């Protein structure tokens, strides 16, 4: 037995039979588990496992011996084997929190591709000449982008947006007409090349791209950048600003801009809008390496959930691919945080939880973060809020907090005892 004060735990007893008693019992009973006679067993190994209790820290190990003799005579003796039991080295309780993932909403898979082309036009003209200067290479870029969507068997073209830009040279009215006509020319080139319906297209134009000029001057290494930007960003009429640039320091800075910067402003930007069909888990798995951009948030999530967590692709989908395409989504950040919590990367998990909103799942996971950090009070407060918001995981995690608190008390007493 184990005893400490009024606390006593009686362990299963062991019976040792004498020779005569053994013969009698064998004759009338069939209990083959009875021990052999004492003379054949000089020693007995005794082992029993019992749950730990706090009072056992100061317990002693005793034995109660009861000898039955002739005519039922009994002799009872108590022995103390150890004045203090030796306890197995105790390790702190490792919490087992419940994490909460958020299932993304199903969405129409709208996609878009953007690009820009620097087409060359003869002075004052807006007709596209496919073999003129850089045009073969620039047109090929556009054709490749549009063709890839049109030839994509799982995609449906929804629209093309074309916007023409001109550099701030010559009169504003002329540039306004040229930028619009050049955007229209590219639209017609694409429409004819691919036999597309007119209704798919939208066009617009920027007569003189002063914003683009300011960005390039600000990013460049120009000695007079501050003065140039003051003119470029002023509220004066475009033609007046052009005159001021040409006059500034004898026109030397303007000629540099005309040569190095203006060609970058003469461009056409385009956007191709399309939708992609929905995929099964098997199809998503095949597209994961080749065209992950065609997968929706829900499809990536469902694919990851179909994998074993030990599979490295599981973490890759949640912490890389989904964040690459849906990095601003609260569910994406919450689910990435869960994976980092599972892997013990608490600092990284905290960073993503900050961007995960205040859903019941996120609040629960914030509580898990505090629980793993050892802050039980903050953890419990989060679990209370999450539970009120409907989190089932939070209910179980509150029990983990209580278990850990009780274990901390045991560990404190255990440490003092040692």
Image: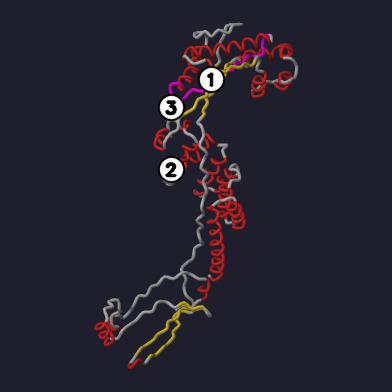
Relative height, residue 223 to residue 135 (above, below): below
Q: Are marks 1 and 3 in contact (CB under 8 Å)?
A: no
Work out whether mark 1 precedes mark 3 in sequence or the reverse, and give the earlier one. 3
How far is the residue under mark 1 from the one under mark 2? 39 Å
Tell me the SS state at disc 1. strand
Quickly name the residue at label 2.
312
Foreground of the two, 58 or 150:
150
* Mark 1 crowd level (few <14, some 14–19, many ≥20, 10 Å Cα): many
Kindly tell me whether residue 381 is visible in this rendering. yes
Is the residue 412 above or below the residue 260 in the image? below
Q: Which residue is mark 1?
A: 160
Identify which residue, 268 or 118, lies in the foreground: 268
- Region of the chain picked out in magenta, as a range: 150-170
Residue at 45%, 22% in the rendered image: 148
Residue 94 in the magenta stretch? The answer is no
Q: Secondary structure at mark 2?
A: helix
Q: Residue at x 47, y 66 (%)?
A: 89
Given residues 149 and 57, the one toward you in this image is 149
Q: So how many labels did they put on this image? A: 3
Q: Is residue 286 above or below residue 53?
A: above
Q: Quadrant of the N terminus?
A: bottom left
Q: Which residue is mark 3?
A: 154
Q: Say which label, 3 or 2, has the lower sequence index.
A: 3
At 33% across and 79% down in the image, what residue appears?
43
The mark lying in front, picked from 1 and 2, is 1
**Residue 94 rendering spot, x and y as whole percentages:** 50, 58
């Amino acid at each position: 037995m184990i005893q400490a004060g009024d606390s006593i735990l009686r362990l299963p007893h062991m019976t040792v039979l004498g020779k005569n008693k053994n013969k009698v019992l064998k004759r009338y009973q069939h209990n083959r588990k009875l021990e052999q006679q004492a003379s054949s067993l000089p020693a007995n190994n005794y082992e029993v496992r019992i749950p730990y209790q706090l009072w056992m820290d100061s317990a002693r190990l005793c034995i109660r011996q009861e000898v039955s003799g002739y005519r039922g005579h009994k002799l009872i003796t108590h022995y103390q084997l150890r004045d203090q039991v030796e306890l197995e080295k105790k390790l702190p309780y490792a919490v087992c929190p419940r994490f909460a993932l958020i299932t993304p909403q199903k969405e129409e898979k709208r996609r878009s591709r953007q690009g820009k082309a620097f087409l060359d036009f003869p002075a004052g003209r807006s007709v596209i000449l496919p073999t003129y200067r850089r045009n073969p290479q620039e047109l090929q870029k556009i054709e490749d982008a549009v063709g890839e969507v049109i030839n994509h068997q799982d995609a449906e073209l929804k629209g093309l947006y074309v916007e023409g830009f001109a550099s701030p040279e010559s009169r504003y009215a002329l540039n306004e007409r040229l930028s619009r006509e050049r955007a229209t020319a590219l639209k017609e080139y694409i429409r004819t090349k691919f036999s597309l319906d007119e209704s798919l297209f939208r066009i617009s134009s920027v007569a003189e791209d002063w914003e683009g000029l300011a960005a390039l001057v600000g990013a460049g290494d120009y000695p007079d950048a501050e003065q140039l930007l003051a003119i470029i960003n002023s509220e004066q009429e475009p033609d007046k600003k052009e005159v001021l640039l040409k006059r500034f320091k004898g026109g030397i800075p303007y000629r540099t801009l005309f040569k190095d910067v203006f060609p970058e402003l003469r461009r056409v930007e385009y956007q191709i809008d399309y939708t992609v069909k929905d995929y099964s888990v098997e199809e998503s798995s095949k597209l994961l390496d080749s065209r992950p951009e065609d997968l929706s948030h829900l499809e990536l999530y469902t694919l990851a959930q179909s994998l074993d967590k030990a599979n490295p692709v599981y973490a890759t989908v949640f912490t890389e691919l989904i964040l690459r395409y849906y990095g601003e989504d609260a569910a994406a950040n919450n689910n990435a945080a869960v994976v980092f919590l599972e892997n013990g990367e608490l600092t990284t998990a905290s960073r993503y939880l900050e961007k995960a909103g205040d859903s019941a799942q996120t609040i629960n996971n914030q509580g898990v973060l505090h629980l793993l950090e050892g802050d039980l009070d903050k953890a419990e407060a989060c679990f209370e809020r999450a539970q009120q918001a409907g989190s089932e995981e939070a209910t179980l995690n509150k029990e983990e907090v209580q278990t850990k608190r009780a274990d901390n008390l045991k560990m404190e007493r255990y440490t003092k005892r040692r």
